[in-house]
């Protein structure tokens, strides 16, 4: 098990390979389609004091509630990352993002961006949103809540030992590509019988 603390550095990412189990601690940010598109079109709207250099972006729309005027995350699971493929390569490059968390992998353009910009893609366990929420120590801030509502807002979270697996590394390897190839071969075998 590899333990990493954000912000991540190129050396952190260079040493990772597909299949590595990682426990993340520090600050991560949620961002889905709306935030990706909005910030790419309006980079000046990145909240004051927020620097995404070395950041981890989580494709997630958390469930949260207010307790004594503080937000508490009750559930947070990965959403399908393919939806962000149109934005992710440019987002990684423009903002210096070092890692993405999601599910299902991303397209070849994102894979190339990970390679060229020294970043990695982590998969989080789908269907374990309540369990993953236990790794959220606190909500540090929430941005664009009024603009995009709870699930599409950008949440700044402090996490401890947040469990992920490297499924696309900065060296161009992708477990998603491997599964697709194996599935294709099996499909061809089955229809050929």
Image (tube, helix red, strand yellow):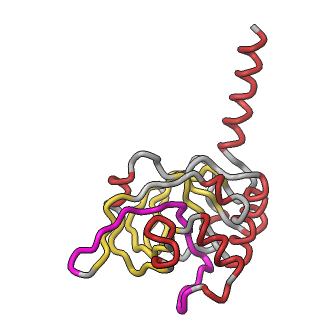
Viewer-side residue, 83 vs 146: 146
The residue positioned 54% from the left and 76% from the top of the image is 7
Q: Is residue 193 left or right of residue 137?
A: right
Percent from the top left, x then y, of residue 161? 39, 62
The residue positioned 42% from the left and 73% from the top of the image is 157
19 in relation to 160, above or below: above
Look at the image and say whether residue 64 sits in the magenta stretch.
Answer: yes
The residue positioned 44% from the left and 78% from the top of the image is 142
Percent from the top left, x then y, of residue 101? 55, 59
The residue positioned 74% from the left and 28% from the top of the image is 184
The boundaries of the magenta stretch are: 47-68
Which residue is farthest left?
A: 68
Residue 102 location, quadrant: bottom right
| Main secondary structure type of the part rendered in magenta | loop
Percent from the top left, x then y, of residue 106? 68, 52
76 in relation to 152, above or below: above
Residue 177 location, quadrant: top right
Q: Split into 4 quadrants, where in the image is the C terminus?
A: top right
Which residue is farthest top?
A: 193
Which residue is farthest bottom?
A: 48
């Amino acid at each position: 098990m590899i333990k990493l603390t954000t912000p991540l550095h190129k050396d952190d990412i260079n040493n990772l390979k597909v299949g590595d189990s990682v426990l993340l601690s520090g600050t991560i940010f949620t961002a889905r389609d709306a935030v990706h598109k909005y910030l790419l079109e309006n980079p000046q709207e990145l909240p004051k004091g927020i620097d995404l250099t070395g950041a981890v972006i989580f494709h997630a729309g958390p469930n949260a509630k207010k307790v004594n005027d503080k937000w508490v995350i009750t559930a947070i699971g990965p959403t399908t990352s393919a939806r962000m493929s149109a934005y992710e390569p440019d987002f990684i490059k423009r903002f210096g993002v070092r890692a993405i968390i999601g599910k299902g992998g991303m397209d070849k353009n994102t894979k190339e961006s990970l390679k060229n910009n020294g970043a990695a893609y982590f998969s989080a366990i789908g269907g374990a949103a309540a369990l993953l929420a236990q790794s959220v120590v606190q909500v540090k801030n929430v941005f664009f809540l009024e603009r995009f509502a709870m699930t599409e807002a950008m949440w700044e979270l402090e996490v401890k030992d947040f469990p992920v697996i490297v499924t696309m590394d900065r060296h161009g390897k992708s477990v998603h590509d491997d599964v697709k190839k194996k599935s294709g071969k099996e499909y061809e075998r089955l229809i050929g019988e």
